[in-house]
Image (cartoon, helix red, strand yellow):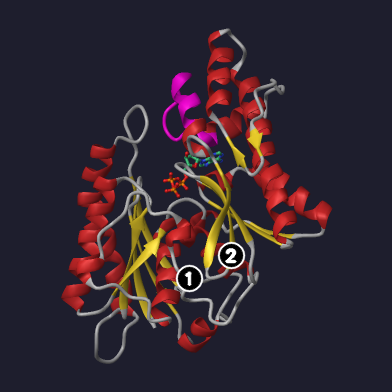
Amino acid sequence: MRILGIEGTAWAASAAVFETDDPDALRAGTDRTPEPSADHIFIESNPYQPDSGGIHPREAAEHMGTAIPEVVETALDHAAARHDGDGPVVDAVAFSRGPGLGPCLRIVGTAARSVAQTLDVPLVGVNHMVAHLEIGRYQSGFESPVCLNASGANAHLLGYHNGRYRVLGETMDTGVGNAIDKFTRHVGWTHPGGPKVEAAAKDGEYVELPYVVKGMDFSFSGIMSAAKDEADAGTPVEDISAGLQETIFGMLTEVAERALSLTGTDELVLGGGVGNNARLREMLAEMCDQRGAKFHAPEPRFLGDNAGMIALLGARMFAAGDTLAVEDSAVDPNFRPDQVEVTWRGTDES
Ligand code: ATP
């Protein structure tokens, strides 16, 4: 089985091919592998880089308009080179249906419909945030982990219960990466700001910032205002960066621990581009270690937006018969993970 995945929710125009010669294992959920090889999940990406400021939806969509056809062509060439025999080079086309920027999603949806109709294969509509979780579950071999999605536009904890991935806790305002990027724009750094905060924090002394956790939810807007005020008052950006990391990641770690405790789960996976941050991974790993839980962070190419995770979840959904008619395939910029009926976990009832 070979599935094309297309991603383009915000900045990464990306296409991938997931391949397995054991679809039965995919159906049974026993196909997990700790290290997918390049052939097993092939990814071609072309990121949008704003000249200044943050991600501009119109510019990002213009980027998708030229980059999506190019990455899809490369992915299909890869699939064709591995294809022997008759029939289409891929068995289905999976695409990110949301959440994300509407103008970008519409280009991805149009590309997916057009390839699926040209090849006469089914369409699979993937929730981007559930895909972040599933790539971690796939790579780790964990049965039923809690997932901390720490990405640009999102920050939440997911856990499986009764046929759906439930949102156990989430940000009450901005996503975690967007919050950090707002601070870095304020001090004049180019997008994306997260890696620059990580580098600067290495030379910084902790500065106290507001720590806002309410039960299972959390908020970043007060921290960002306080961080900007510190910068305006002349506090070194290195010190503010250290304070930001300790405060924000401390909040995420606290809520992740509570999610493990409340669900009784001893498996945690990390998803999203902020997961590239070594300090966040260190805090989560230490927390899991202290409570005897297992922790998995996917390799970098599967953390930020990428079509590999879309192709993988697309393959699982396709194997479960979870396909979409073209007339039902509209994208949804506000597509929440708990709207998705999980069809691909077989008899797994945890
Ligand atoms: P989603 O649609 O899943 O919310 P997104 O496009 O908003 O995705 P991702 O691709 O998951 O975001 O991640 C991008 C974010 O990750 C940016 O905000 C960027 O600053 C942040 N980021 C990347 N590397 C690091 C790092 N080392 N430390 C902190 N933040 C990082």
The amino acid on which the numbered mark 2 sits, given as a three-letter code, is: Tyr
Task: State the CA–CA distance, disc 1 to disc 2.
Answer: 9 Å
Give residue 122's position: percent from left, percent from top.
27, 77
Q: Which residues are magenta?
A: 181-195
Query: Which of disc 2 and disc 1 is earlier in sequence?
Result: 2
Q: Amino acid at mark 1?
A: Val
- SS for dot 2: strand
- In the image, is residue 259 above or below residue 53? below
- What is the quadrant of the N terminus in the image? bottom left
Image point (42%, 28%), residue name = 190
> How many neighbours does mark 2 have within 10 angstroms: few (below 14), some (14-19), or many (20 or more)?
many
Looking at the picture, tell me which residue is in the foreground, 260 or 282: 260
Please name the residue that numbered disc 2 is placed on.
160
Q: In the image, is residue 152 part of the stretch drawn in magenta?
A: no
Q: Residue furthest top?
A: 233
The residue under the point 64% across, 36% down is 214
Q: Position of residue 282 (x, y in %)?
A: 71, 46
Q: Position of residue 18 (x, y in %)?
A: 42, 73
Residue under the point 74% across and 62% down: 264
For the image shown, how many numbered marks are present on the structure?
A: 2
Q: Residues within 10 Å of mark 1 (few under 14, many from 20)?
A: some
Q: Do the CB atoms of the residues marked 1 and 2 lie less than 8 Å apart?
A: yes
On residue 342, the disc is: 1
Q: Is residue 2 left or right of residue 123?
A: right
Up/down of 3 relative to 238, above or below: below
Asked if the stretch drawn in magenta spans residue 194, the answer is yes
Label 1: element kind: loop
Residue displayed at 83% across by 52% down: 290
